[in-house]
Structure formats: C-alpha cells, structure tokens
Amino acid sequence: MSQMPQQAAVPKCPSCEEPLEPGDRFCGACGYDLSAVPARPDDSPTIAMNGAVPAPSSPPGGVEGVEGVAGVAGVDWPVARDSDGFGRPAPVHVAAEVPGTDSGGSPLPPPPPPAAPPMPSAAPEPAASGMRFDHRADGREPDEYPLQAPDPRSAAAPAPTAPAASEKVCVACRAGRVDDDGYCENCGHAQPRERDHMEQESGPVAAVSDRGLRHHRNEDAFSVGCTALPDGAPASVAIVCDGVSSATRPDDASLAASRAAGESLLAALPRGTHPQQAMHDAILAASHAVNALAEEPRTALEQAPHQNAPACTLVGAVVASGLLVVGWVGDSRVYWVPVDRSTPPARLTEDDSWAAQMVAAGLMSEAEAYADERAHAITGWLGADAYELEPHTASFKPDRPGVVVVCTDGLWNYAESAEEMADAVPPDAAARPLHSARVLVGHALDGGGHDNVTVALLPFPAPPQGAGSA
C-alpha cells in the first residue's frame, strides 16, 4: 500500500510521544522532565517480528509495506526504554491518560467535564429556541435540524401534567387536556363538538343525531326516555327538534326545546295525564323555554342589534297502552312503518311549510310544491317571533306491531314518501332500534348529508287485539 512521503521527524516526548518545540524543558502534554532525556541514538532500526531482515528502503516518493514487519524503513519510530536513564523505571501511562487520535491522525477533543455536556463548536442558539441551525459544507440546508441539547445552566421547563381521569383527552394527541374553549392544551387541536354526533338508547327507544357533511355544527337535538303510567304500563317518549338556521342561536333553541318537552312528558304521564294532552302541554313548555332565550340583557342587544330571536321546530311521539300520540310544530315528521312490510306505511304529520300550504290550497301538486325553492320555508316554529303558536297533536291505535320514525328533514329529504322511508328502515328495527337509527343516519349521509340528521325510533308492540285509528 502506497503512503505519502514522510517529513523530517519532529522531536517527541519520550513518555507520551507528543511533538516538542525546540527549547522545551518539560513536555506540554504529560509534564515529563526533558532535561533527564539522554541523547537519541543515531540508529533506530526496524525490527521484524518474525526475525527476518527488514526490507531495504523504498525510493523517494513512497514505501512499500512488508507483511509481518512491525515498522517501515524510513519512518522515525520511537524506541521503548526500560528506564529514564537514572535507574528509575520509565513512567507508565494508562490508556485513559494518553490523548488518542481519530482515524485521520488528529488529536481527539478532551473528554467533557462530568458536570456539563461539551458546548458545540459553533455559537449556540439561545436555549429557549430548542433548535440548532446547521449548514452543510456545500452551502445547502441540511435535510434535518436535530434538536439542540438543553443548556444545563437554564432551568428545566416543567413537564406537562397528564389530564385527570375526569377530564376530556384530546382526540389528536391522546395526551393533552381539552380546555373550556374546545382546544387541546398540548397540541392545540380543535376538538369535535359534543353535539356533532350523539347517540342515546333508553329502554326500547333510541335516537341518533349527526352534524351531516355540509354544516359546521349540529343544530338538531333530541330527548328520549321511558316511564310508567299509573297502572304500571310502560310508556316511551321521543322528542326531536331542528334549529332554524336563519335565527340566532338555533342550536341553543333546539336543545332547550327538546329538554323541556321531554321533561314535561316524563313528568305528566306518570300522573295519569292523557298522552295527547301531555303532548300538547309539552309543546307549550318547549315554546316557553325557547322564548326565554330571547330575553337577552340590554347590553347584549345593544352590541348586536340585528340579532333575531332563537327558533326551532319540534316533533314528538309517545307510545303507551296501545296508543300512539304524535305532536309537532314545523316541518319535522313522524312515519309509521309496520313490521309486516306487506302492509302499507304512513306519514302521520303534516308540514308547517310553504309547500304544504300550496298543496292544501290546491294551488300545486305535491311534486310541484316540493320542487320549488320555497318548499322548505316554514310557516310554524317555536320562538319569540313566531306569528302564532299552534301545536298539532294526533293519536292513533295501530292494530299491528311496527316502528315509529321521528325525524328532521335532514333524513326525510332522502326518503320523503312513506314507502321510501319504509324501504330505508331495516327489517329488524323493532328489535334493534339503535342500530336501525344509525342505519337511517347513514342513509342520509350517503345521500349527500346536506343538513343535520336526527332520527328517533320507537317500537310499537303488538296490541292484545286489533283497533282502528282514533
């Protein structure tokens, strides 16, 4: 193997072999006393490890290596000594005390002090930045910027505390606590609103509500529950409300109305109030709750003088003692779907809408009215600015088992007729109401999900004997 030409030998310390400067009396690396060093012998022969005669020197320009030879002719190798020349043993150094060299022959940097890591050769960035901006030799930016080691002289930042078991955890990083504004305190990710998707099952009745695919929030709300009549017969209740998007705080309006109506029904039925009267009173209670939202402080009205009153629609159903009672204000609907699909389904409500008025007045066919862009303009709603509250109630006595579908227009826009709704309802809906409600919400989302979607299902058990409508 060829090597570069060797330069004249530089005087070295006999102890550590560090280069010396002319006139040095002590070694600058190990402190060895150079005044006791005897004169270097004129000849430093290379000794072959196998006892062979060393090869002759190579011509100028390089030397050829000889296999099995400990040294190379022409290279100034130091000679090991047994003593310092005064009868004392030569100093011995352990490996850790002698500076080593890297693969290029350069001295290794001194080991870092135990109290602190070595400082980088370049000027460090402030400790608070947490980044080091390195540059490659070719002038281009590096592919990665490794994190700079923290400065031990600066105070360590406190570690983030894990959220308590009762606190909401971020859906993105799964570690940070969610603040009151709905953002993660660790990664800053905005959390889904609680009402974006809601599900509830209470006895035989179940409901599902979803924001849909186009709206930025869910303005629907529902309330479901079970109770017992004075004779012990079970009663199921479902209320579905749809916030009026053109009104102020429609989500608050639907939530207040659904809660008030549901609580009213669950309190009235055990007292023996007739289900149809209980439904009428529940709609009035919901109206009062929505009207109360419009009672803003004077300062709030001065800051937003163009706000209108919160508003929503409402539809509900009660199943008790073989009786089916429905009530509504607005354009949300109730459908009847029998378990025996060979018998016809039915729609049990009439919309408070422009389209329904046109059809009732004989001015348009149903297909023409609902194809008009004004079709979904409602003519009845709950709210302080409603023209006149007219709660609608009706009671029925089905003579066969079935399922009652209570929904907003976010669903029935994709299954408008009773036959279309019956086709969308799973055959086992009476036995699996929550699963079937999820299927119906999925039907609306698959159709486009242009609006919030809310649906509640109430199974209607088989009556002991047939009965007609009442």
Image (cartoon, rainbow, N blue to C red):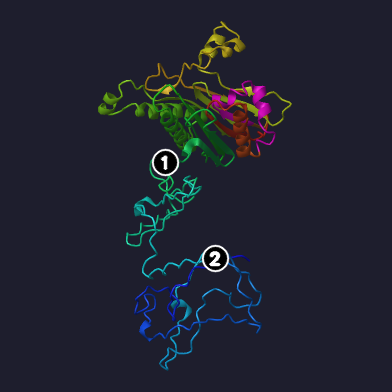
Return the disc, 1 or 2, that comes first in the chain's sequence. 2
| Quadrant position of the N terminus in the picture | bottom right
The vertical placement of 434 against 56, above or below, is above
- Which amino acid is tagged 1? Gly
What label sits on residue 182 in the rendered view? 1
Q: What stretch is highlighted in magenta?
A: 403-430
Residue 290 visible in rendering: yes
Amino acid type indicated by mark 2: Pro
Give the SS element for disc 2.
Answer: loop
Residue depicted at 43% across the width and 67% down the height: 109
Looking at the picture, tell me which residue is in the foreground, 413 or 72: 72
Q: Is residue 205 left or right of residue 142?
A: right
Q: Name the residue under label 2.
A: 5
Q: What element carries label 1?
A: loop
- In front of the other: 112 or 277: 112
Number of residues whose C-alpha sits closer than 10 Å to that of mark 1, classed few (under 14), some (14–19) or many (20 or more) = some
Left or right, 113 with respect to 220, comes to left
Q: Of all residues shown, which one is farthest toward the bottom?
A: 87
